[in-house]
Image (spheres, rainbow, N blue to C red):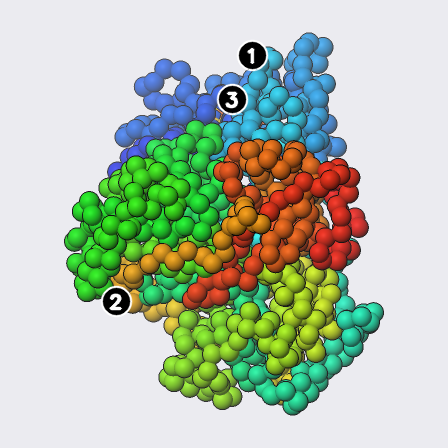
Amino acid sequence: MTLLREHDLGTPAEAGPATIELEIDGLAVTVPEGTSIMHAAGLAGIDVPKLCATDSLAAFGSCRLCLVEIDGRRGTPASCTTPVEAGMRVLTQTPRLAKLRRSVMELYISDHPLDCLTCAANGDCELQDMAGAVGLREVRYGYAGENHLDAAKDESNPYFTFDGSKCIVCSRCVRACEEIQGTFALTIAGRGFDSRVAAGAGDFLGSECVSCGACVQACPTATLEEKTVIKLGVPRRSVITTCAYCGVGCSFKAELRGDEVVRMVPYKHGGANEGHSCVKGRFAWGYATHKERVLTPMVREAITDAWRAVSWEEAISYTAGRLRSIQARHGKNAIGGITSSRCTNEEVFVVQKMVRAAFGNNNVDTCARVCHSPTGFGLKQTFGTSAGTQDFRSVDSCDVIAVIGANPTEAHPVFASRMKRRLRKGAKLIVIDPRRTEIVRSPHIEADYHLQLHPGTNVAVVNALAHVVVTEDLVDHEFVAERCEPDDFNRWAAFISAPEYSPEATEEITGVPAADLRAAARLYATGGNAAIYYGLGVTEHSQGSTMVMGLANLAMATGNIGRQGVGVNPLRGQNNVQGSCDMGSFPHEFPGYRHVSDDTVRHMFEEVWGRPLDSEPGLRIPNMFDGAVEGTFKALYVQGEDIAQSDPNTHHVQAALASLELCVVQDLFLNETAKFAHVFLPGTSFLEKDGTFTNAERRINRVRPVMAPRNGKQEWQVVCELATAMGYPMGYGTSSEIMDEIARTTPSFGGVSFAKLDALGSVQWPCNEAAPSGTPIMHIDKFARGKGRFVETPFIPTDERTNRRFPLILTTGRILSQYNVGAQTRRTENVAWHREDLLEMHPYDAEERGVVEGGWVTLASRSGETELRAHLTDRVPQGVVYTTFHHPVTGANVVTTEYSDWATNCPEYKVTAVQVRARVHATGARKSPSIPPDPVHADVPVLS
Ligand code: SF4
Ligand code: SF4
Ligand code: SF4
Ligand code: FES
């Protein structure tokens, strides 16, 4: 358990090497140069009263409560804005200061409702605390004069309220929105007595606010307050855990009353987020107790039968019996499993172990197949490790940031805020994306270059960038000579220098003006520390792996690897994509990315697991689907993934699922895949899980149970019981014993244990004898594979082409308030922001087709068609349309194709040739989409 409110030192810490010695209230204090007197005093255990200061924000100096006396100086300077000086002698408590502070507080309180006893923040209010701290006992001024007690309330935001009558105009909220979040949604409107906080011209919901909650956290009064606190009361205890949404992996304090979560507060000491969060992690956790959650195991003989609730014992013996029977009739390779990047490392580890040891094959794959499998392949080939190279902190040292095929503001919001802070301080920005994402132009940020390429031409663009680097001799020859394979480099340099890869030669293919491309390449190569951050816009292509290797080539050629501020960084989509890959979820790899044909490794696992293991790689997800349709693959266990909605070419996936003799789904809700299931095993939400997630920076974070599993079991226990029922005894006392086995068998996790994570907060792998505290930056002195390897990356256009029938290119992405297939976020108030998937379309393309803003359109490809409403915007260029895939009713994957990455089968979600037609009656309700309606929508509002 953790203290509810952490010690606040008032101003941010300084980290410079020079130190200053001074005396505060008679105590000798030594602090870094630039430290404020308030912060120095706090470090010495002396809390100076304050209201406008908090250590997450730069000092502001408006409330005048933190006054101090300094020997030899006139007046009473504010301690938050006065830096320490050598030999200073400071007094923080004198009768004169006490009197001044009481006067200040008296003025505040005289314009504040005296309803502490009934206020939601009673006991958790800094104003209340400060009144006590300065000894205010009476207020001499009455309420007869002008005041703000009738100021209006704004309750428009679904998660928090703004009560203007309680505002002390300290600006902490405004500064949090600017400095921490970078949205600049708030201002102080009016002057003097009329000053007030304003969210644009209207209310919070209608403003630019993205509901990150930073202002709520910064507010020292109950002006900005979570609605759950108002409803349930101030929390009494807290547990530190990790967000279960995106790959940023934010740490939170889950704050509770009894067993009920009251609010989630981003944890100040969280390694990935340092006290910040987005709307999903902070507010969208209500799905965990949603009434549609299934808590009892269910079985049925056929998918046309009704579900029958059964005991855990019956569900497990029924499943094991049917799996064994299928293997007896169709062979051991007729069954397999899919692991989930939403589950913990421990839960994933036991599933792949069950498949390998109990099923007796390697038919295990993961949902990372459809997102970042090219990252694993491409970075392993070039650097030797299937992971990003940096920690998030590294972006603070960047001079040039290249954002490629990623939309961090929507998909990785907390990291985006950090990146934006660096950009506002002057780092240069290159964005490579067909769409004008928010980061291209946002408050105080404008990309230096936005290379708006045609979808599907990534490799042509990265080759042209590398062509400029090599032919203009911008190569870091010293780095290449010392750190990379010379023959590979020479071959690659000759390959990339060919005239066909010049920006001028590729301009027509890519749509990127050659001059812009040359300028961007020069900036990346010569602008100082240059870092690449990329997302699914890089990987989800037929040349996804080639593009990842192209990025690695570019970084090595310019020496942008192996120190702070540089690197090649995949922005992982789901909370545990990195971990699920690390844990051996791929059919050809044991945990730690070791090939199943490696005899030494396999024999080691055989010894530890006590079973002979298959040396042949098993089936990938698309192979399982093909096998099911062909009749050779008969049973599938699916851990926490909605493949019927998330995988491409829905019709094919549905046909495969419908062909299975047994489909087992382990999840929170009856999702689209469960429509094809014979066994439903209830899963646990992140509030119940006990284990670890590994985020995009390889950081292993603890996921601690905040409440007992509502279904009665941890998911790993269910898997162990199933394996045992199949004849392979598997069991652990606790999830930490699973991590101990991971550490024993996986060198990069050799030094990881729950005890170490509890002691250090988190560690980034590799964490072993050589790096007992983990490895924030990789490849510092040498690459994991020894020498870096340049790989030739010829551009091969996708087979998916536009034609007269399908003249537009569809590309897909995410939106901030929703998450993947929306199973969680659609069951929260986040639907206030995104009730349906929309089709973004350039006004010119729309006009040609008679499509109007908000009108229904039919979106068709050669795979299928669906219907959704149009939003006209020049964010997308002519010829390109864009949509999100969060709502099953849209069924965006009905139209995506089966084309995939040549190396990993990662689907080509980002390029689909489509046609868009306006519906004749462009208003009214949606026509029946290609997949059956989801019962979930019964109580989730959908615009019509
Ligand atoms: S919730 Fe976040 S974005 Fe909205 S006003 Fe507050 S700080 Fe700004
Ligand atoms: S809303 Fe809160 S943080 Fe913002 S100015 Fe008012 S009291 Fe300060
Ligand atoms: S940025 Fe990602 S990990 Fe952090 S709170 Fe938001 S969804 Fe959760
Ligand atoms: S805390 Fe220093 S002026 Fe407000």
Q: Could you tell me the amino acid type at mark 2?
A: Gly
Left or right of 422, for residue 408: right
- Counting residues from the start of the chain, the first of labels 3 and 2 encountered is 3
Q: What residue lies at 52% left-to-right and 72% top-to-bottom? A: 620
> Which residue is identified by label 2?
786
User: Residue 347: which quarter of the image?
Assistant: bottom right
Q: Nearer the viewer, residue 223 or 37?
A: 223
User: Residue 168: which quarter of the image?
Assistant: top right
Q: Position of residue 344 (x, y in %)?
A: 56, 64
Q: Quadrant of ligand 2?
A: top right
Q: What residue lies at 76% left-to-right and 51% top-to-bottom? A: 928
> Which residue is identified by label 3?
63
**Disc 3 to disc 2, how far (Cα)?**
57 Å
Q: Could you tell me the amino acid type at mark 1?
A: Gly
Left or right of 20, for residue 319: right
> Which residue is identified by label 1?
192
Q: Nearer the viewer, residue 510 or 307?
A: 510
